[in-house]
Image: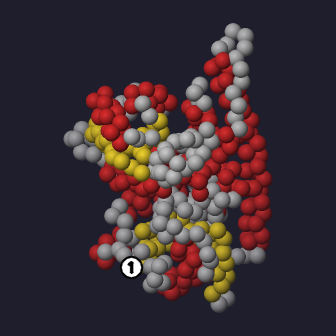
Amino acid sequence: MAGSWLLGSGVGAPGERPTAVLVAVHQQDEAGDSGPGTETSLTELRRLADTDGLTVADAVVQNRSRPDPATYVGSGKVDELTALAERAHADVVIADGELSPGQVRNLEERVGVRVVDRTALILDIFAEHARTSEGRVQVELAQIAYQLPRLRGDGRSMSRVGGGRMAGGAGMGVRGPGEMRLETQRRTLRQRATRLRRNASELARRRERVRGRRARNQVPSVSITGYTNAGKSALLNRLTGANAEVQDVLFATLDPTVRRIGTGELTYTVVDTVGFVRHLPHQLVDAFRSTLEEVTRSDLTMHVVDASAPDALDQITTVHGVLHEIGAGSVPELLVLNKIDVAPPESVLALQRVYPDAVAVSALTGAGINDLRATLADQLSSR
């Protein structure tokens, strides 16, 4: 976590994981019932924090119809959060939602520690996991889009964007130094974003040329999509013999991996893409749009589902929502129920009742992989 854009430098003792406290609003309807997926969302936030190298000490949850416009949770819960953060010696408070700049400022003043939201946490994870130049450009563009409306005079929000090279200017004339510093920061960020967009456009053109060559050679393409940690990279490795990185963390894969598969007379490419998650920040969707075009331009999308996840149906809905958002909703889809080696059989059967054409596999053991290969060949040959 050294130099983390989310926490800044010097947070936590050397060699120790920083400590986080979570805060969430479970929105209720008029009958007092919480919306679907609220507990699951908080559990997922814990995993996101763990992926980003944080130790979660505890969480404060409030049931209410809507977040408080000033402090996200009500005044009493803010007091509870303050006491909990003090007892836990928390380095950061993470909200399970996107906070306005005013909510962040008010919570930090009341709680006394750094406050970030779910979007900032996901952006930080993406920044840590981006390996290629294209991935790093896309993540930094997303960070800048998130940070611009949130700039403050204390400089903390600038700790990572642009590699920490953003210098504040001295005040002059009738404007105070804080105002001049913010103007300088905004101008520097916008200039940086302009350069990054030029780089991203060139990288997108290169990707388009590669896609054009595949199209001219009439090589069908399959894109692997799905919720984060559904086992997409493991399935790619099983299908192709590739060595894509496989980790039991969220967002292990950000940079697309392309491999070829040959089955008799049919040869096609398989592209592993970034996983999706609830409330995927729109800044990331916009920044990664050129990469996600691998999905929109594919002949078939292989939607991988973690059949062992208790909220598998909700995850499928989330992925479908993102696919429609990027313009890939009309791409033919093959649903693949992964992890059947650990999923309860009744859960797999329940999913198959909803999606009777789904193929059940285990990327870990290889079960069902031959059926998957045959189904892929049949569907691609018929197009």
Can you name the residue that lies furthest to the left here? Answer: 31
Q: How many marks?
A: 1
- Look at 33% across and 49% down and name the residue there: 38
Query: Can you give x and y, in whole percent of width and height, for residue 242 in the image?
Result: 62, 77
Residue 267 versus residue 180 in the image, above or below: below
Q: Is residue 145 above or below residue 155?
A: below
Residue situated furthest front in the rendering? 14
Q: Which residue does the image show at 72% across and 14% down from the upper left?
A: 172
Left or right of 61 in this view: 280: right
Local packing at callout 1 (Cα closer than 10 Å; few below 14, some 14-19, many 20+) is some
Instruction: Look at mark 1 in the image and give the residue it sits on.
Output: 341
Horizontal and vertical percent position of residue 351: 35, 71
Q: Choose top left, top right, bottom left or bottom right for residue 69.
A: top left
Q: Is residue 57 visible?
A: yes
Task: In this rendered view, identify the residue nearer to me: 285 or 170.
Answer: 170
Residue type, numbered disc 1 = Asp
View extreme (top): residue: 174
Q: Is 295 situated left or right of 49 in this image?
A: right
Q: Going by the image, does 119 lie left or right of 306?
A: right
Regarding residue 95, the answer to whether it shows in the image is: no
Which quadrant holds residue 73?
Answer: top left
Determine whether 234 is above or below 91 in the image: below
**Quadrant housing the C terminus:** bottom right
Which quadrant of the view contains residue 174? top right
Q: Residue 31: percent from the left, percent from the top? A: 21, 41
Residue drawn where x is 68% and y is 29% of the image = 185
Mark 1 lies on a secondary structure that is loop
Q: Nearer the viewer, residue 42 or 301?
A: 42
Residue 170 coordinates in the image, percent (x, y)? 71, 20
